[in-house]
Image (tube, rainbow, N blue to C red):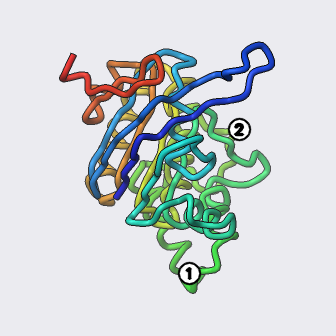
Amino acid sequence: MLKLIKVAKSYESPADSAGLTVLKDITLEVGEGESLVIVGPSGSGKSTLLNIIGALDRPTAGQVLFDGRDLADLDEAELARIRNREIGFVFQLHHLLPQCTVFENVLVPTLASKESRSRKDLQQRAGDLLERVGLKDWQHHRPGELSGGQRQRVAVVRALINGPKLLLADEPTGSLDEQASQNIAKLLTELNRREGVTLIVVTHSLTLAESIGHVMELSAGLLKDRSQR
């Protein structure tokens, strides 16, 4: 499903001619339907790595292969299609549209899709997913009427509406209390199993990480398996 080969990322720095290196020689393989959690402190490059995996950013060096395709060989239109149809994103902040209902927010990613699926089928999937995460009775409410945990569940459903192969979650519980965080972790693992979607989560919380799946640690730009420490 996903393969990174010697991926590196650096940025130009006015104060340092060598620039700022965030990622170094990252090599990683994630199979279809697997779950992986990447932990590390703030500023360690977790979000940068997730953005590269999700085709939101390009590496300075190395290759990113997604479902057998080298992302470097694709133009912006092709990358946009992959981001819309094959990769789902969940962020720390839910980014729901406040003027839209829960149901309407879930369907937003389908508006940019050129696939032939009918609106009826998409609406049915939205309703089914909302029922699965316990939000059937809230689908006609607006985000402001929901708790933080409920809003994040809506964001997860929105990320899944187009049936992606890969779900990326960047600090998905960072703004939630402990109970809501546990609920989101449980939801992600259940959806990983039931939907068969490959799951990659980045977080600073080791407790959350160990409740979701295989854990790797990003430190000083290097990615290491925690079991090898």
User: Observer-nearest residue: 217 or 101?
Assistant: 217
Query: What is the spatial separation of the Cα atoms under label 2 and label 1, in whole angstroms?
Result: 27 Å
**Quick one: label 2 or label 1, which is nearer the N terminus?**
1
Res. 50 mark: none
Specify the quadrant that holds the N terminus.
bottom left
Q: Dot 2: what SS?
A: helix
Total labels: the figure holds: 2
Q: Residue at x 53, y 54 (%)?
A: 159
Q: Which residue is mark 1?
A: 120
Q: Which residue is mark 2?
A: 144
Specify the quadrant that holds the C terminus.
top left
User: Observer-nearest residue: 50 or 112?
Assistant: 50
Q: Residues within 10 Å of mark 1 (few under 14, many from 20)?
A: few
Q: Is residue 212 left or right of residue 70?
A: left
Q: Amino acid at mark 2?
A: Gly
Q: Residue at x 29, y 29 (%)?
A: 215
